[in-house]
Image (spheres, rainbow, N blue to C red):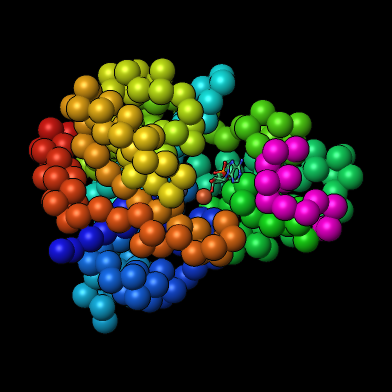
Amino acid sequence: MKYADLHVHTFYSDSTFSPEEVLACAHKSGLSGVAICDHDCVDGVEPCVAAAKPYGIEVIAGIELTVEKADAEIHILGYFMDCSREWFRKKLKSMQHARLERIRLMADKLRDAGFKLTVDDIIALAGKGTVGRLHVAQAMLKTGKVRSMFECFNKYIGFLKPCYVSNVKFSPAEAIGMILKAGGVPVLAHPDVTGKDEYIPELVECGLRGIEAYHTEHKEHVVKRYEELAKTYGLLITGGSDCHGLGKGRVLLGGVRVPYTIVEKLREEAQKIKNEYR
Ligand code: AMP
Ligand code: FE
Ligand code: FE
Ligand code: ZN
């Protein structure tokens, strides 16, 4: 049987892993495919394609976008986009730029809260691609004022916590529309982590095509609930580990994987979307 992990980050967003490390790890886990889903960035896809050559592993172009509602932050994955489209690349660049401004504001708030850190400390940890809150948390930990990642998010930078600054305000229609227009398949990421199933009908209305039922944070009964919801709304079922290298403590890659039939379904759906949004 062939398997794929459909949710993997690289150091082009907030993983500690280079493309070479991602692919070596995928090979060790016996995977036939990985989808590279960095936050607001597709710059890691081509380097991963190159790093995959010696192993014969398929690299699927993916992305993870953030949608903000008043009471929730929803992540939308995209698969098989045509990343060469000029407008798509330009839009991502502007989102990456906005992330820098957001991190500056968060650094100001954290300094006011007594953290001895600068925005440059955070950016230095981010390296290539996009900067995000996992880098902020790493900079916070380095100051010694907090002990754990949990404390960073729970007390300071988690959604609506005192040092949180929101990202670009993106509506479900905008995020899903952007993926569809680029010929990709929009999929709801880790719905149980978001914990707001009440938004699923609205997302479906906007063109959502799949739901990530299998995820590192999803227990068995949760998986069942999302398999049922997928049936109700006619969505594809996907899954992935959401590996951030060592960014979240331990390497998760390959810990959640799906049979290749799911990859083929996504590929077919992407072809349909490309015909529709030509
Ligand atoms: P950003 O895209 O900058 O908003 O950051 C999103 C990253 O922060 C993702 O990798 C999330 O998994 C991570 N994150 C968000 N909330 C938490 C939390 N409460 N604990 C740990 N990581 C979190
Ligand atoms: Fe992340
Ligand atoms: Fe996510
Ligand atoms: Zn992710």
Indicate the position of residue 114 as horizontal and vertical percent values. 89, 45
Does the magenta run of residues contain 166? no
Highlighted range, magenta? 143-155
For the point 24% across and 39% down, the residue is: 237
Q: Is residue 10 left or right of residue 5?
A: right
Q: How many marks?
A: 0
Q: Is residue 150 left or right of residue 267?
A: right
Q: Is residue 113 left or right of residue 15?
A: right
Using the rendered image of the protein, determine whether residue 206 is visible from the camera's viewpoint: no
Q: Is residue 181 above or below residue 23?
A: above
Indicate the position of residue 231 as horizontal and vertical percent values. 20, 27
Indicate the position of residue 243 as horizontal and vertical percent values. 45, 57
Magenta segment's dominant SS is helix
For the point 35% across and 22% down, the residue is: 200
For the point 72% across and 52% down, the residue is: 148
Q: Is residue 61 above or below residue 24?
A: above
